[in-house]
Amino acid sequence: MVLGVAAIFEAVTWTIAYREFRRAKGPLSWWAAMRTSKDPIPFTVLVEDTAAMFGLAIALLGIALADALGSPRLDAAAARHSEVRLIFLEAQALAASRPLATQ
């Protein structure tokens, strides 16, 4: 139930972030828009929301497999995977936005 509600909220915020980023990028490609933007907020929110959606999917898969196979280790493995993935993505976002802070 909680994952379902979280997925709904994340889907709504992802949709808003996607529309805002698409409007802000104009005719540029996605990658060019991310690299040349002076405002990191739209693409940072989009990347974070995308990561959250993947995290929810992984968590749901881990819970479902743990329940179906009777192995709580699968739930724990899914949680660890989500944590590592979020740390990696946040590090990438920080690295991408660092040049913007020095301008």
Image: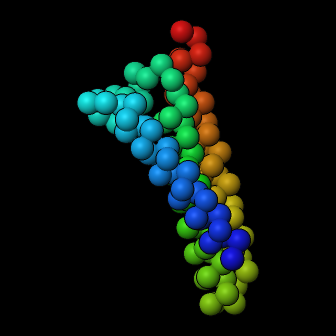
Task: Name which quarter of the figure residue 95 lies in.
Answer: top right
Look at the image and tell me whether residue 51 can be seen: no
Look at the image and tell me whether residue 76 can be seen: yes
Q: Residue 85: x percent and y percent?
A: 60, 52
Q: Is residue 87 left or right of residue 22?
A: right
Q: Relative to 67, does residue 88 appear above or below in the rendering?
A: above
Q: Residue at x 69, y 61 (%)?
A: 80
Q: Quadrant of the C terminus?
A: top right
Q: Relative to 67, does residue 3 appear above or below in the rendering?
A: above
Q: Which residue lies most toward the left here?
A: 27
Q: Relative to 25, does residue 48 appear above or below in the rendering?
A: below
Q: Residue 1: x percent and y percent?
A: 69, 77
Task: Name which quarter of the figure residue 8 lies in.
Answer: bottom right
Q: Residue 23: x percent and y percent?
A: 37, 35
Q: Residue at x 65, y 68 (%)?
A: 5
**As rendered, which of 10 and 34 lies closer to the eye?**
10
Q: Residue at x 64, y 52 (%)?
A: 84
Q: Relative to 53, does residue 76 appear above or below in the rendering?
A: below
Q: Is residue 76 left or right of residue 28?
A: right
Count of all numbered marks drawn on residues in the image: 0
Q: Residue 52: x percent and y percent?
A: 59, 55
Snapshot colouring: rainbow
Task: Name which quarter of the figure residue 101 lies in.
Answer: top right
